[in-house]
Image (cartoon, rainbow, N blue to C red):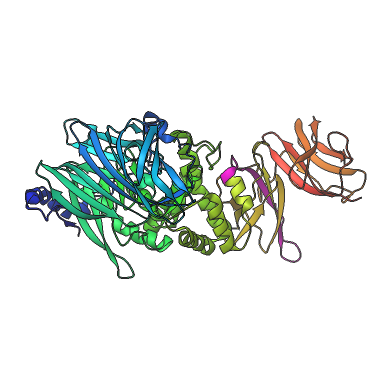
Amino acid sequence: MAEFKDVFSNNTFFEGIMKKFTLLISILLLGSTFAQVYENTNVPCKPISEMASHYSALAKASQRADIFDYDVHYYNIELDINIDTEIIYGNVEVHLLPEVDNLESIQLDFASGMTVDAVTVNGANFNHFSDLLSITLDGSYNVGESLVVGIQYHGHPLQGGFQAFAFGHQGNNPSRPPMISTLSEPYGARSWWPCKDVPTDKADSVRISLTTDAAFDAVSNGMLVSETLNSDDTKTTIWEHKYPITTYLVSLAITDYTYWTEMHHFADGDSMPLEYWMYPSSATAPMVERWNRTAGMIDIFSDYFGKYPFAEEKYGMAQFQWGGAMEHQTCSSMGSYGENTIAHELAHQWWGDLVTCSDFHHIWINEGFATYSEALYWGAVNGEEYYHAHMASKVNDVNSSVYRPDTSSVGAIFSYSMVYQKGAWVLHMLRHVVGDETFFGSLRAYRDEFAFLTASTEDFQGVVEEVWGQDLEWFFDQWIYGIGIPSYRWWWSASELDDSGNSQVLVHVEQVQSSALPTFKMPIDLSLSDGNNESNMVIWDSLRVQDFSITLDFVPTSLTFDENEWILKSANQVASAEGGFIPESFKLNAAYPNPFNGEVNIPYTTGPNFQGMLTIYNIRGSEVYTTSLHHAAAAEYEAHWNGRDNHGVNLGSGVYIATISSAGNGSISQKISILK
């Protein structure tokens, strides 16, 4: 059972606060008797509506000239926060190393609405304009010479992006206690502290000192170092985080909290605290019990991805007033309390925090991975069918690319359908393409190679290719940079057993998505059965029109097409008849001569009032010739093709696909060959 305690129990001033936990302990004892509440798992952790309402320039990357001139190693952030006036007073030290010789100035991202009072230590003078703080150093520094720049400032932080820095109240209710919190993704850190606000420059560590009203708990990244009561009825709380961290993952959350903790024990014998801060009014038995499921989630994700990345410190969750949730490093901020959201934010500690997207064009490296982890969690808890059901629920519009070409706004970056849902599907499909051993081995290798660093799509692709031993350019091109999904139209037929006891099965697959969309190459699972016998196989479909011949020792009466939904697609089985699946209103007979040189005859039989098309495709699936077919009477007919395209140009030797189709009745195809 979790241990409830006062986070400030070392100070006698706070002993009275322990009383508020007595009722909660009693409630928690009843937590296991509550049934699980229904949860809609198909919602984003960052709601689209709130993206729009909080949009501002803080969603835009700055145009910084010196991004590669220096490397930040350490931030020391000291904030004095006046809750009544909503003014913060800051003193930030930036410890850095030059990456070029003769470094005489640096630029930091810092919102223009804040007032810079002074620069100190190795800073000589400054200019603060257009959200950039330009600092002239006190000398010239070369590669490897460490220096420190101190910035003293004050002001009311600008709110933007998703949130940045917000003064509010618990539950956004002014009658309830004040609530101060941050959510700096993508570029909101600059609204409340001067920093190099780019994902690629992770500081090695950070120290955060928060001074505010003594009645409130101040929560941040890493481990609690000390709490000190001050004579003016304020308290200074100091946190230290000794792992690399990017700016948008540095956070604070300040209010009157109910707090509890428990020790988590890893499989290797290590342990670390799990710490939770929740509004007293929210700390009901079902809510507490749900948050306490985090321990089991850590075990599940550690099995899949490797040990929790920040095991020397903690994992925590702190409630805040925003409607979504945010994966702040070692302490997620929670405005949504569903089990699915808890799993999503925890998974981010691996995918987004340990390994961070190199820039927000590749944000799927964070969000797609965390969304896919939800499915892994539900599968581990409830069985493999729940994994597939969770993935099947995440189908949405796919009219743009997973890669985000426009990163000028929160809405453009954080597309739920593209980044979260389709990003998760990319991993789901990749798992089936390369197999479980390669897929999960690749995740471990990717973690190991890019731990505490940043990565792009190409970095991840390179790791999977190395583990699998094959090229995957085709996969990432069509699913990350391409648009749309395959739209399959298919049918099949099976012959009676021949003298050798075999049935010849023909499976016909067409990709009928718009010609503006790519032709997809994907493995498709087929399962054929006669009720007693079953044969499972994988076909690799890569053409607009493709036929697959299969030999079985039984006559199948049913065929399932991608039954477990490993492909993000639409699929339509067309036309059926007893004993198999063939179009009813027409039949395509064997072309002759085949191969041909000059002209081929294509016989076919139709029902009455037939209207259709004869289309010839090359082996790449591109249409080369088409003609319409109209017949009033049911009879056998014959089409003729002279091997020329629609423009009368003679085509070269090779394999072609002849397809007869009729609206509402599907199509039938066969291979023909030109031999010159």
Magenta-drawn segment? 480-505
What residue appears at the point 61 percent right and 63 percent down from the top-left corner?
469
Residue 499 magenta-drawn?
A: yes
**Of 260 and 230, the residue lying toward us:** 230
The x and y percentages for residue 532 are 57, 62
**Of 241 and 535, the residue lying toward us:** 241
Q: Where is 63 relative to 388, above or below?
A: above
The x and y percentages for residue 103 are 46, 47
The x and y percentages for residue 371 are 43, 48
The x and y percentages for residue 278 are 21, 46
Q: Where is 656 relative to 406, above or below?
A: below
Whether residue 268 sits left or right of residue 640 in the image: it is: left
The quadrant in which the N terminus is found is: bottom left
For residue 603, say whether it is visible.
yes
What residue appears at the point 42 percent right and 56 percent down from the top-left corner?
452
**Of 275 and 69, the residue lying toward us:** 69
Q: Where is 435 relative to 422, above or below?
A: below
Whether residue 411 sits left or right of residue 338 in the image: it is: right
Q: Where is 282 relative to 168, above or below?
A: below
Q: Quadrant of residue 500?
A: bottom right
Residue 90 magenta-drawn?
A: no
For residue 283, say whether it is visible.
no
